[in-house]
Image: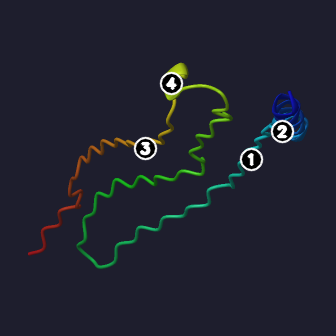
Amino acid sequence: MKKLMLLAAVLAMVIVAAVPAIAQIGQEAEQEAESGDVNQSFDVSSTGDNSNQCAGIQGVANTGNAQNQLDLIQYGSEADDFEFEEVGSTITVSPASTTTCDQQVNQAASASG
């Protein structure tokens, strides 16, 4: 009987010690993102008396932030209990540019004789 009471007392102390720790399990997640303005400048120049140029310029910039945060505690559960759909983040930049140049020489003809 004495052993049984001692076992019950030890078990009660373990439960009293464990309950506050279990009750404190929690998780808060915060994810912030900032992006800035894109400032691009392009300069195309051509010099010379007989120069011909066709420049198709395209600037590509990305100010986004790829974020993927899962707010999850795996307490008292198995890994198979959770399903993740549509997770993952990607930023895809795929520019396309078509430049058509109709280059001609427009020169006034002069005949001197």
Quadrant of the snapshot with the C terminus? bottom left
CA gap between label 3 and label 1 equals 22 Å
CA gap between label 2 and label 3 equals 57 Å
Q: Which circle marks residue 14 in the picture?
A: 2
Q: Secondary structure at mark 3?
A: loop
Q: Secondary structure at mark 2?
A: helix
Of the two numbered discs 3 and 1 in the rendering, the one whose residue sits closer to the viewer: 1
Density class for disc 3 (Cα within 10 Å; few <14, some 14-19, many ≥20) is few
Q: Are marks 3 and 4 in contact (CB under 8 Å)?
A: no
Q: Which circle marks residue 32 in the picture?
A: 1
Q: Which circle marks residue 40 in the picture?
A: none
Query: What amino acid is found at the position of numbered circle 4 in the picture?
Result: Glu
Q: Earlier in the sequence, mark 3 or mark 1?
A: 1
Q: Residue at x 60, y 43 (%)?
A: 67
Q: Where is residue 22 drawn, in percent x and y?
A: 81, 35
Query: What amino acid is found at the position of numbered circle 3 in the picture?
Result: Val
Figure quadrant of residue 112: bottom left
Of the two numbered discs 1 and 2 in the rendering, the one whose residue sits closer to the viewer: 2
Query: What amino acid is found at the position of numbered circle 1 in the picture?
Result: Glu
Query: What amino acid is found at the position of numbered circle 2 in the picture?
Result: Val
Q: Is residue 14 above or below residue 33?
A: above
Left or right of 32? Residue 86 is left
Q: Where is residue 6 drawn, in percent x and y?
A: 86, 36
Q: Are marks 1 and 4 in contact (CB under 8 Å)?
A: no
Figure quadrant of residue 18: top right
Q: Earlier in the sequence, mark 2 or mark 3?
A: 2
Density class for disc 4 (Cα within 10 Å; few <14, some 14-19, many ≥20) is few
Residue identified by numbered label 4: 86
Density class for disc 1 (Cα within 10 Å; few <14, some 14-19, many ≥20) is few
Residue identified by numbered label 3: 93
Q: Earlier in the sequence, mark 1 or mark 4?
A: 1
